[in-house]
Amino acid sequence: MKKQIEKIRDRLRNILKKVAAVVVIVATSGIISNVQAQTQNADVNSSKIEPKHLPIPKQAPATEGVLSLSGGAGLYYWDTGGEGPAVVLLHPGRGSALTWPYQQPAFAKAGFRTIAYSRRGYFGSPAGSKSDTGNYADDLNALVEHLNVDKFHILGLAAGGFAVSDYVVSYPEKLLSMTIVCSLFGLWDKNIDERLDFILPKSFGDLPPEFKELGPSYRWAHPEGVKEWIEMEKKSQGDGVRYGQKSKSNITWEKIRAVKIPTFFIAGGADLYQPPSMMRAAAREIPNSETLLVPEAGHAVQWEQPKLFNRSVIEFFRKHN
C-alpha cells in the first residue's frame, strides 16, 4: 500500500513539474513579445531616418482629349480606361489635371478607371467666354456623360472640393463615395470660416505658392520634389485667362447630409489653409464620415506622402464599390 502511494506522489510531482515548465515558457514568451512590440514602436517613433524622395513614377497608358463646351470653353482630361470602378479627381487652385502623377499609375494598377480634368482656364482647358462661365457641377456632368461613366468615386483636393460639394448636391445619384482633401467644400459656415481671419494674415496671399502649399518638413527634406511641384504648378496655370465659376446649387450641410454618401476627410498635419482642427470640425457635420490625418504634410498631401495617401484612399474606395 505504501509503495502505491509513493508511486502516485511521484507521478503528481512529475505532472506539477511539467505544468510549471509550460507556465514559465508561456509567461516568458509573453514578456518577450511585449518587449519586442515596445522596441518596434520605439524604433518607429524615434526613427532618425528620413523617408526617401519618391520620383514621379511612370504613368499608366491613358487617353487624352478636350471636351468642347459652350462659349468656346473646354475641359482637358485624361482617362486610363478599364472595366473597374471609375474615380474622378478634382484639382486644387494651384493645379490641374497634372496634379496627380503619383495617383494615376497607383489607382490604375489597383483596378480603378482613373480620370482627371482641368477646370476652365487651367492647363489644356480653354476659358471660353466671360459671359458664359458655366458651373462646377454641369461641367463635370458633361464630362462623365461624354466618357460614358454612370457611377463613380469623386475626390477633390483644396479648391477641387468646391466642385465636389456642388456635384454631390446636384447629381448625388451618380456617386459611389466622396473624398475631401484639405478642403471645406464650397459652403460658407460662420462658425468655421470666420476663424480663418485668426490664422491667415492679409499678406498670406502674397507668399510664394510652394510655401503656402507644401509643408515645411517636405520642403526641407526634398528640394527636388519641391522643384517638380513648382514646375507642375506653373504649367497648370495655362495661359492665365480665367473667369471663375460658381456652383450650380446652393450648398448647405443639410443638403450634403441628406444625400448620405460615404465620406472621407483627409487633413494635412502642417496645412496652413485647413489645419486638422478645422477639418475635424467639418467632419463632425457629416455623421459616420471617416477621417485621416497625414502627419507633417501641408496642403498637398497627395504629393508629399503619396504612399499613405494612395493606400488609404484605395481602401476607402474598395469599401464602397
Image (cartoon, rainbow, N blue to C red):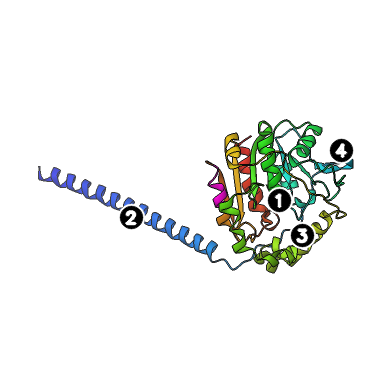
Spatial separation of the CA atoms under disc 2 and disc 1: 61 Å
Mark 3–mark 2 distance (CA, rounded to whole Å): 58 Å
Tell me if residue 45 can be seen.
Answer: yes
- Label 2 sits on residue: 24
Q: Quick one: which residue is furthest to the left in this view?
A: 1
- Residue pictured at 83% horizontal, 49% vertical: 121
Q: Which labelled disc corresponds to residue 70? A: 4
Residue 233 image point, x, y percent: 79, 58
Q: Earlier in the sequence, mark 3 or mark 2?
A: 2
- Between 16 and 7, the residue placed more toward the observer is 16
How crowded pointer 4 is (Cα within 10 Å; few <14, some 14-19, many 20+) is rated as few
N-terminal of the two: label 2 or label 1? Answer: 2
In-front residue for pair 232/318: 232
Type of amino acid under label 2: Val
Q: Secondary structure at mark 4?
A: helix
Q: Position of residue 271 (x, y in %)?
A: 63, 59
Occupied quadrant, residue 132: top right
Q: Which residue is mark 1?
A: 159
